[in-house]
Amino acid sequence: MSRYLDERFCALLPYVPGEQPRDRKYLKLNTNESPYPPSPRALEAAAEAARTLQLYSDPQCTLLREKLAALYGLRPENVICSNGSDEILDFAFAVFCGPSRPAVFPDITYGFYRVFAKKYGVPFREIPLRDDLSVDPADYETNGATVFLANPNAPTGLALGREAIERILRANPDRVVVIDEAYADFSGGSAAPLIADYENLLVTGTFSKSRSMAGARLGFGLASPALIGDLERIRYSTNPYNVNAMTMAAGIGALEDEAYTRANCRAIAENRDFLQSELKKLGFTVTDSKANFVFAAHPDFDGARIFAALRERGILVRRWDEPRIRSYNRITVGTREQMNVLLAAVREILEEMK
Ligand code: PMP
């Protein structure tokens, strides 16, 4: 830290991304990336766009917003695009929270919410999940705060139904409710249809998971035109060209190949259910994940030791040294072959640890 850093940022603890090591070849099951490459249409479109990189990208993301609006049954005025969905979440903390608009989110959720709150000096409260790690919607009904909920939640994978979300929206007419749907394509349920009835709903989505484009950085927000206008205000005050031309073209290409995305999501959901049931047979406790990852703990073996033993075998998963979830590992769902490699390693490790 230099002596020039403003004191507002001295206590900021930045988000720690999952590791992306280059020292050897790993089976990477630690950052919820897709095991499949992007759609061929996305790749072709990106290559084509590269030919005209001397030009700025379309700051309005016109065609991309039209395609997203069509996918969700909305209008382009309901859509904003961003450099990953992290950017929309950042914007939401910037414009919908402040000293008199605190934020609430679960104690166990996406770690970036806490970082954004601190970055903007937003007061926040972390509401404990139930003992079974699920969200109690009643906890979000009387807060007077801007609500941030990942649905499915991370790293538990547990999802709330649309009725629960509607209850939260109804109870908070004067505050924005942000539903972070980074993993919603693996469960089939989006809250986007509620946008017509609730002007306080902001849904965020990403191309990083279901559309295999984590490295392209493309996210979006869906909301009433009024909320989108507020987010555009901060986007145009930050970087109107936040979505680069190759990424924008790739995103449009991906949306023209929805069959590819749907097939991949189906395969991942099947592999997730397979992995969950195999881990249960080995004695693991697993949450009922609706995402592209599995959250598993073994009652007899230490989560950190399982993590380390997998790493030694070249398999990366993710864990957090936080009291309530210390025994768990989060495993990204990959291809069936990858899941079999992982399971073989887990069987060996449990045998050795006995
Ligand atoms: N929300 C949640 C719950 C996530 O796990 C992630 C991925 N780390 C994101 C948002 C952000 O993803 P991206 O910026 O790649 O769209």
Image: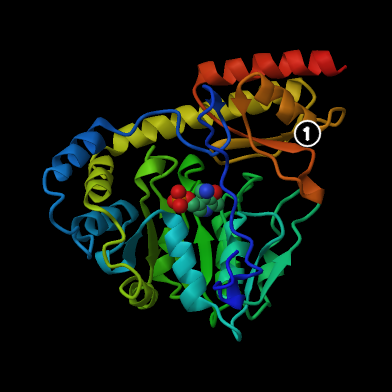
Is residue 18 shown above or below 281? below
Q: Which of 328 and 48 lies nearest the eye of the viewer?
A: 48
Q: The C terminus lies in which quarter of the figure?
A: top right
The kind of residue on which mark 1 rests is: Gly
**Where the N terminus falls, by quadrant?**
bottom right
Q: Residue furthest bottom?
A: 100
**For the image shown, how many numbered marks are present on the structure?**
1
Residue 220 sits in quarter: bottom left
Specify the farthest residue to the front.
3
Query: Looking at the picture, does residue 332 appear above or below residue 69?
Result: above
Instruction: Specify whether residue 350 is in view.
Output: yes
Camera sees residue 121? no
Tell whether 229 sits left or right of 167.
left
Vertical side of 68 occupied by 333: above or below: above
Q: In this view, does 219 lie to the left or right of 165?
A: left
306 or 283: which is nearer to us? 306
Residue 40, image x, y percentages? 25, 31
Is 80 situated left or right of 138 in this image?
Answer: left
Q: Horizontal placement of 277 versus 325: left or right?
A: left
Residue shown at the point (45%, 34%) measured from the top left: 34
Residue position for label 1: 303
Percent x, y of residue 89:
48, 63
Q: Which residue is drawn at 27% across and 47% down?
A: 247
Q: Is mark 1 on a helix, strand or loop?
A: helix
Image quadrant where residue 74 sits: bottom left
